[in-house]
Image (cartoon, rainbow, N blue to C red):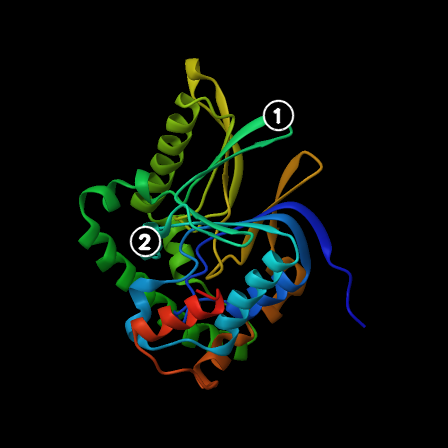
Amino acid sequence: MKTQKREIGVAVISDVHLGTYGSQARELHTYLQGIKPDILILNGDIIDFWQFSKRYWPKHHMKVVKDIISMASKGTRVYYITGNHDETLRKFAGMHIGNIEVVNKLELVLDGKSTWFFHGDVFDVVMQHSPWLEKIGSAGYDFLIHLNVFISYFSRMLGKGKVSLSKRIKENVKTAVKYISRFEVTVATIARQKGYQAVVCGHIHLPEIKEIDLGKTGTITYLNSGDWVENLSALEYSQGAWKLYFHTDAIKERAYQCDAEDYSEAVLEMDNKDVFKMVMKEFQL
């Protein structure tokens, strides 16, 4: 017997990083199977083209792609907003594939509130001035994810639950906290100057909904959809209000059960071009 899907006005996910060991694609597949949104916004870094050299593409990563295509075929309007890890798709901005559209940014009016959607890397000082440094940082982050898999596995065996090294760094290292605060204020300021009442982004892997007071400029609603590497979070908009959804709240430790499994399950061995062609084939291009 099929469970009834939750109807949502708008669902936003970002930073899935399909094609990497850290991507919790199995859990995202479960989430997508349980919702029926009018609009699905993929807010950047859905497919991680930077990391394709690993030749890693498990079956659940392709299931997520198929979930998205299935939603579009059943009437959901899907917007794929490009990010820095999937910047390869920026050359396809404006392209329509049925109900799926590739864009670099998006504007929607939700219950009279002008809302701006974009990934966020364009306002990242590191990305703008030192993209090579960002890639080094990405490699370091990916190393933490690898290390985290094994640490979490043994931590759960000892009954202590999952450990997130990178999340602790973000929450406790002063420079990381300062960077996140500066990012949020920069995004909010530019969005407010452009006349928007709300701004939705991803990129920094930190789910959030809050009002930011910009002084004389006024206040603006800042939202971040988080990620599907650590937080397993999404933004959902229904009946005039936004809320953050955390998949771990729904399934507790089941959300991390796949850590060790993703290393043992069979994966498809292919290079960058092969994976890109396979994904494009799924979109029937």
Q: Nearer the viewer, residue 110 or 102?
A: 102
Left or right for 68, reference 91: right
Task: Work out whether 218 lies above or below 136.
Answer: above
Q: Give the crowd class for mark 1: few <14, some 14-19, many >=20 residues within 10 Å.
A: few
> Residue 178 occupies which quadrant of the picture?
top left
Kindly tell me whether residue 264 is visible in this rendering: yes
Q: Nearer the viewer, residue 180 or 46?
A: 46
Estimate the spatial distance between the alpha carbons at disc 1 and disc 2, rounded to whole Å.
31 Å
Which numbered disc, 1 or 2, marks the residue that appears first in the sequence?
Answer: 2
Q: Amino acid at mark 1?
A: Gly
Q: Amino acid at mark 2?
A: Glu
- Residue 26's spot in the image, x, y percent? 55, 71
Q: Give the crowd class for mark 2: few <14, some 14-19, many >=20 residues within 10 Å.
A: some
Left or right for 53, reference 225: left
Residue placed under numbered mark 2 in the picture: 87
Figure quadrant of the C terminus: bottom left
Q: Residue at the spot x=32%, y=61% of the render?
A: 141
- Residue 187's spot in the image, x, y percent? 39, 33
Kindly tell me whether residue 161 is visible in this rendering: no
What is the residue that sits farthest to the top in this orientation?
216
Element marked by disc 1: loop
> Residue 86 occupies which quadrant of the picture?
bottom left
Residue placed under numbered mark 1 in the picture: 112
Left or right for 284, reference 49: right
Element marked by disc 2: helix
